[in-house]
Image (cartoon, helix red, strand yellow):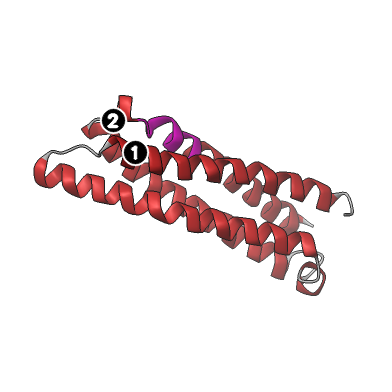
Amino acid sequence: MTLEAFLASLHLVAILALVTFMSSQAALCRIEWMNAAVVERLVRLDVIYQTTAAVLLASGLVRIFWGIKGASWYLTQPMLHLKITLFVVMVLLSIAPTLAFRRWRRALHVSGALPAAAEVRRARRLIMVQSHILPVVAVIAVFWARGW
């Protein structure tokens, strides 16, 4: 019982951290606020975001295999498959902003150039799409917990 509570708590903290760092990226990724410090900060936030997503995935997998209900129960649940699919979509959507942030930092170090407005808008749009998928995952989790 203690292990289950610990794993559930770790999973919840990872979700909250993911929301925090995704929100920070969305807030900073605006052309009107873009400067050298913001480019550096976006790269750091993205590393933390990726680490948090890895902890979220790992804690979820550990709950599946070491949790009270066991893998045989979890793996037959359609809601789990839907949650994992949406999480994978979020991960795939996060690749382009990650690459953009690193490209922006490289250009900043080489030439001092800031990213073009269109690039910033594109990265922000992808972050915002991720941030709108995450609450859907939470709603699925709530319905699943209540027997759907």
Number of marks in the rendered image: 2
Q: Position of residue 107 (x, y in %)?
A: 17, 46
Q: Is residue 37 above or below residue 51?
A: above
Residue 88 part of the magenta-drawn span: no
The residue segment tinted magenta is 22-30
Q: Nearer the viewer, mark 1 or mark 2?
A: 1
| Residue at horizontal 54 percent and vertical 46 percent from the top | 130
- Asked if disc 1 and disc 2 are in contact, CB closer than 8 Å, the reply is yes
In the displayed image of the protein, which residue is found farthest to the front? 118
Is residue 54 or residue 90 the one in the foreground? Answer: 90
**Mark sitting on residue 84:** none
- In the image, taking residue 17 as reference, residue 98 lies left or right, namely left
Q: Residues within 10 Å of mark 1 (few under 14, many from 20)?
A: many
Label 2: state its secondary structure.
Answer: loop
Q: Determine the residue located farthest toward the right in the rendered image.
A: 147
Q: Find disc 2 in the rendering and name its residue.
A: 34
Q: Amino acid at mark 1?
A: Val
Residue underneath mark 1: 120
Q: CA distance from mark 1 to mark 2?
A: 9 Å
Q: Measured from the top left, where is residue 6 in percent x and y?
A: 68, 53
Q: In the rendered view, does 115 fall on the left or right side of 28?
A: left
